[in-house]
Image: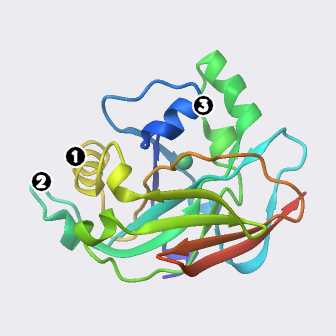
Amino acid sequence: MGATDIRNIYCIGRNYRLHALELGNEVPDEPMVFTKPSHAVVPMNGSAVEVPGDAGEVHFELEIVLRIGARYEPGADTDRLVDGLALGLDLTLRDVQSKLKAKGQPWLPAKGFKGSAPLGEWFPYPGSAALAETEFVLLRNGETAQRGKAADMLFGVSELIHYIGKHYGLDAGDIIYTGTPAGVAALHEGDRLQALWSEKEVGSCTIKLA
Ligand code: ZN
């Protein structure tokens, strides 16, 4: 599946307790869903990813990304609805987002800019049980920046799919960024990012501030 085949991009905010707290946010009592335009997707295939260099801090957020393979119906077996897994970055203009939050405005300028959704390679979905304890890691310039596992999500895969499917709809080609664990920080020109799933690299890129 190429970027052009991706339809809706749903993202979950504050889905890991320690990440919500590190940004001074309350832990939500239901999934906090926002979207990105499909134009946000760029491949995380070793090449450069261009991000705005003139809009304050750009933060990395490494996330498990689910690909939906069929239309959601109430009561669906969510493990059968997911047909692929990847790691992706929910790049965020943090200073812009802080201003938007203060004014109560939508997050699109902070979260939806072109190139804000680098996406690694797709691999088979192992099912939510196997997913739960598998570690995913973001290396920045060879050092661990983020480490997480799905078991630490506030709202798990099944809950997220039922929630999004019920309220907004899900069908083949939709993807879900499931939220980021703690450790987010600002990127710098030339940063080398590697996404690891169970110690195997499944995506990488170099940051170019433009
Ligand atoms: Zn995120």
- Alpha-carbon distance for marks 3 and 1? 29 Å
Residue 128, image x and y in percent?
25, 66
- Alpha-carbon distance for marks 2 and 1? 7 Å
Q: Amino acid at mark 2?
A: Pro
Choose mark 3 or mark 1, whichever is in front. Answer: 3
Q: Which residue position is annotated with label 2?
A: 74
Q: Are marks 3 and 2 in contact (CB under 8 Å)?
A: no
Q: Residue at x 26, y 51 (%)?
A: 165
Q: Which mark is residue 87?
A: none
- For the residue labelled by badge 1, is the local secondary structure a helix, a strand or a loop? helix
Q: Nearer the viewer, residue 167 or 45?
A: 45
Q: Are marks 2 and 1 in contact (CB under 8 Å)?
A: yes
Q: How many marks?
A: 3
Residue 105, image x and y in percent?
61, 24
* Left or right: where 89 falls relative to 46: left
Q: Residue at x 20, y 63 (%)?
A: 78
| Furthest residue in direction top, as rendered | 103
Q: Which residue position is annotated with label 3?
A: 23
Q: Which residue position is annotated with label 1?
A: 166
Q: What is the image's colouring?
A: rainbow
Q: Residue at x 37, y 58 (%)?
A: 150
Neighbour tally class for label 3: few under 14, some 14-19, many 20 plus, Cα within 10 Å: few
| Furthest residue in direction left, as rendered | 75
Q: Earlier in the sequence, mark 2 or mark 1?
A: 2
Residue 158, image x and y in percent?
23, 55
Neighbour tally class for label 2: few under 14, some 14-19, many 20 plus, Cα within 10 Å: few
- For the residue labelled by badge 3, is the local secondary structure a helix, a strand or a loop? loop
| Up-down relation of residue 124 to residue 93 (above or below) | below
- Alpha-carbon distance for marks 3 and 2? 34 Å
Q: Amino acid at mark 3?
A: Leu
Residue 26, image x and y in percent?
46, 24
